[in-house]
Image: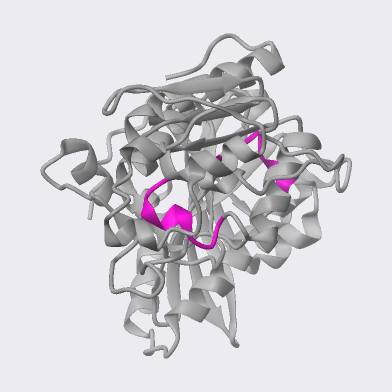
Amino acid sequence: MSVLLSTPAPAGLMSLPARLVRGFAIACFALLCGAPAHADPATDGREIATVIQDYIHGSSYNQPDQLRRAFHPDARLYLSQGTDGMREVGIAEYAGWFVKNPGQFNGRTGRLLGVQVEGNIATAKAEILVDKDQARYVDLFLLKKLDGQWQIISKTATRQTAPAHGRQVLLVVSSVDTMPGTRLTAGNSFSELIHAYAGFRQAGYGVQFVSPDGGAVPLAYIDTRNGEHKAMVYDDDFMWALANTRRPDEVNAGDYAALMYIGGSAAMYGVAEHPGLQSLAVRIYEQQGGVVSAVCHGSAGLVNLTLSDGSALVGGKRVTGYPDAFEDKSAAYYRTFPFSIEQRLRNSNAQFSHGARGTSHVQADGRLITGMNWESTRGVVAAIVQQLDVQTGAAPSGP
């Protein structure tokens, strides 16, 4: 646990009164001591996620009733004031700041970063991007279950400078952990996951994960001798997101500027044929004017994508993915593959190409961007960010 060391408040700024610190500490201690054991933390986690979503949606779309629903009536919020100051407000006052233009998006984009449950108390963390202020807030919540209902009883936040666009990217991963008919393990490529996640975060994009089944997904090719791998294995926000991926029916295509299929052996199963994932990709591409992309075996997700006019999304476009030339066709793993990525893309009139083994090879054809292998992940992310910058007329923000 990290410890925050306090310093004297600068002249002109009021520090938090000692009585509030003492009162809050006593309340937390009482909650911890009085927390009974609870039988179903997974259910609690889902219920808490719904509460935080009420907060996020209510504050993003000027819905004060939904915002108040997330909080206990006596909840206190400790908000930043100036450089080092703090301001205490109640939920009634806070909700009153969101009464103008009800239902209208106000530029706040949020996502849940993590939940930790202990009996009938919990903590949660969320990220809020505010485009007009060029700010990124990390909100911390203390919740308690009262009369069978989770409610926020306290909130505080820290502010950081962030790019102003506040846009999000959706990463598609597979739920399959075993190759069909075998005991061979399947998983999503950890290198591709961390390079995509870090690249988009560095460029100021929020990142969400979606999988056919939702929840925790299998991971493959983790090497903790690799410094990047080790750092991300112990990154709480990243690993919580992979343990709590969304199902397609929980995702709104209108929230995303791009969708990217992640590779790994698991990408060959349960993704390409999933109608919900197909619908998300096509809606982001056609209705949002967004980017659809893939890397390595993730290109399997492209093979069934059909536009509203009946044509293949990849038809006539330059594309790449893990090529047949690099597959071991005599191996047990390959015999479980439902199709050849390269042949299916060629059959859809895609212009498939690949580079040398172990090198980065990226194909960018407008809003369709693909990479050959895990080494191409950073290049795919850079090309996506560049394409999105061109669309918005923004200064380059890529990694």
Q: Position of residue 116 (x, y in %)?
A: 39, 67
Q: Position of residue 67 (x, y in %)?
A: 72, 58
Image position of 161 (left or right of 292): left
The answer to whether residue 351 is seen in the rendering is yes
Q: Is residue 61 magenta?
A: no
- Quadrant where the C terminus lies? top left
Taking the spot 37% from the left edge, 89% from the top edge, the residue there is 37
The answer to whether residue 80 is seen in the rendering is no
Image position of 87 (left or right of 279): left
Question: What span is colored magenta in the figure?
Answer: 252-271
The one of 136 and 251 positioned closer to us in this rendering: 251
Image position of 1 (left or right of 64): left
Q: Position of residue 228 (x, y in %)?
A: 22, 37
Decide: is 150 above or below 316: below
* Image quadrant assignment for residue 26: bottom left
Decide: is 338 above or below 126: below
Q: Is residue 270 magenta?
A: yes
